[in-house]
């Protein structure tokens, strides 16, 4: 499968899982409702919504939500062009897939921000679950929707020493979604496996053609490149002419005697 299709398939799968889980939670859980997964106290589905970034980080500013939504859209557009450039440069597949995970996560949360306020009713504490409503009759405006979070893993409480302020500290306290997990996985993959991705250079180079061996080359005679010196040629010519001159002299002597 071509690398571009592989990345597109990854993004599509992440988006389907992310949006399916959010639709289920939004239409089946009351706000702040909690449910243990697999009977484990440290693994829960806990429905909350946030207007900010991953893991519930928010901006205390009137236009913070709009600014964040616009930033996400620009970031996804940039990531798409970046992936195309990486594929054209024949960058290792693992790195491209990691960037694809980041892109899929950002796109998943953009869908919440852009459309959930238009298609869902408000979720309330102990006020029943939200419902799908006709487009544009939801609880918010375009790009002002709330991101649905539900994955919660309160693994352990640590008692902090007095010199650190005392009290209890919970690991792991953030509540997040599949899109957040995809972004985090993509970033961690790049950080942990960058040496493996780029151990032979940034781009995947074509296999080198082995040089031809001496056996494959045509045999050459060492005398082919040897030039006969001019002096030797002259001497050979002189030597060939010398006997004929001596013969002429001897003939003249015989004639004179007669």
Image (tube, grey):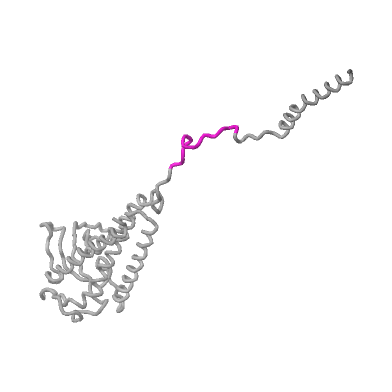
Residue 178: give x, y in percent of width and height.
22, 63
- On the image, which quarter does residue 22 sit in? bottom left
Magenta part, dominant SS: loop
Residue 150: give x, y in percent of width and height.
18, 65
Region rendered in magenta: 210-223
Q: Where, quadrant-wise, is the C terminus in this rendering? A: top right
**Of all residues shown, which one is farthest toward the top?**
257
**Of all residues shown, which one is farthest toward the bottom?**
137
Identify which residue, 159 or 37, lies in the foreground. Answer: 37
**Of all residues shown, which one is farthest toward the front?**
258
- On the image, which quarter does residue 30 sit in? bottom left
Q: Is residue 226 left or right of residue 82?
A: right
Q: Is residue 203 above or below residue 238?
A: below
Residue 61 within the magenta-colored segment of the rendering: no
Residue 157 appears in the rendering: yes
Q: Is residue 235 left or right of residue 122?
A: right
Q: Is residue 248 above or below residue 132?
A: above
Identify which residue, 127 or 164, lies in the foreground. Answer: 127
Task: Say how many tags the image has.
Answer: 0
Identify which residue, 146 or 133, lies in the foreground. Answer: 133
């Amino acid at each position: 499968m071509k690398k571009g299709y592989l990345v597109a398939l990854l993004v599509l799968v992440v988006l389907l899982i992310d949006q399916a889980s959010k639709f289920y939670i939004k239409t089946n859980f009351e706000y702040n409702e909690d449910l243990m997964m697999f009977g484990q106290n440290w693994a829960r589905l806990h429905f909350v919504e946030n207007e900010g970034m991953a893991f519930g980080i928010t901006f205390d500013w009137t236009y913070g939500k709009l600014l964040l939504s616009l930033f996400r859209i620009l970031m996804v557009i940039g990531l798409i062009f970046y992936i195309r450039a990486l594929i054209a440069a024949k960058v290792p597949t693992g790195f491209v897939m990691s960037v694809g995970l980041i892109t899929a996560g950002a796109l998943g949360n953009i869908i919440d921000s852009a459309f959930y306020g238009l298609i869902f009713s408000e979720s309330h504490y102990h006020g029943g679950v939200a419902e799908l409503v006709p487009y544009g009759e939801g609880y918010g405006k375009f790009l002002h929707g709330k991101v649905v979070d539900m994955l919660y893993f309160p693994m352990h409480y640590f008692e902090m020493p007095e010199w650190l302020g005392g009290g209890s500290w919970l690991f792991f306290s953030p509540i997040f979604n599949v899109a957040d997990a995809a972004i985090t996985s993509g970033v961690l993959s790049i950080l942990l496996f960058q040496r493996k991705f780029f151990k032979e250079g940034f781009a995947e180079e074509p296999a080198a053609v082995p040089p031809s061996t001496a056996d494959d080359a045509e045999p050459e005679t060492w005398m082919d490149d040897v030039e006969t010196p001019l002096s030797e040629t002259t001497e050979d010519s002189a030597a060939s002419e010398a006997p004929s001159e001596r013969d002429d002299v001897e003939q003249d002597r015989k004639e004179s005697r007669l």
